[in-house]
Amino acid sequence: MGVPKEGEFITIKSYKHDGSLHRTWRDTMVLKTSECSIIGLNDHTLVTESDGRRWVTREPAIVYFHTKYWFNVIAMIREKGVSYYCNLASPYVLDDEALKYIDYDLDVKVFPDGEKRLLDVDEYEAHSKQMHYSKETDFILKENVKILVDWINNEKGPFSQGYIDIWYNRYKQLSRK
């Protein structure tokens, strides 16, 4: 598969540092691709956990992946406003099977009122020891937390309402075709 085109569907797979499959999302609609990023949308998307459990996403969510930054962003569009779930993760790679990345446990959740929470610090510490994260990886992830918080604080990229409006409206146009 080459670069997916607007309106096409891709699979997303997250892995852990040791190479084990963590989670799979089927049928994410591609809204935009560029040399460095992919924007997509999940809406009632089937998710399969590594233990085989399956569930379906409840609301539309714009997903943002980049080849340079060590995080990805999920903007969940809810009645009370947009909530963000940001995974500290490797930059993505794309192959014939899926868009793939390594999930590094740490997450930042942003609530509609702007409150931010750093999640899963204990899980990060445990996996860091268990899977032998390098000092370089640890440094890169901590630096990317700073970049991510700066984006959040300055409503950059996926964290601006204009971005949400543009890409959600584009999804609605494409899904009507």
Image (cartoon, grey):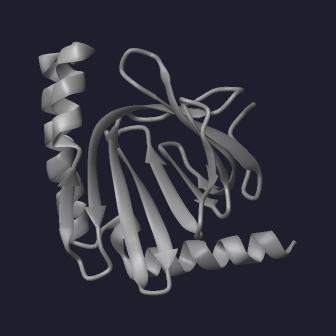
* Image location of residue 159, percent across then percent down: 35, 70
Q: Quadrant of the N terminus?
A: top right
Name the side, left or right, on which 30 lies relative to 51.
right
Indicate left or right for 70 with 173 as reference.
Answer: left
Where is residue 79 shown, x and y percent of the image? 49, 86
Q: Quadrant of residue 3?
A: top right
Q: Position of residue 9 (x, y in %)?
A: 74, 49
As rendered, which of 50 and 17 lies closer to the eye?
Answer: 50
For the C terminus, give its image quadrant.
bottom right
Instruction: Single out the residue that lies furthest toward the right.
Output: 177
Residue 57 appears in which quarter of the rendering? Answer: bottom right
Q: How many marks?
A: 0
Camera-nearest residue between 98 and 57:
57
Q: Is residue 142 above or below residue 64?
A: above
Residue 45, above or below 11: below
Image position of 97 with respect to 58: above or below: above
Q: Residue furthest bottom?
A: 80
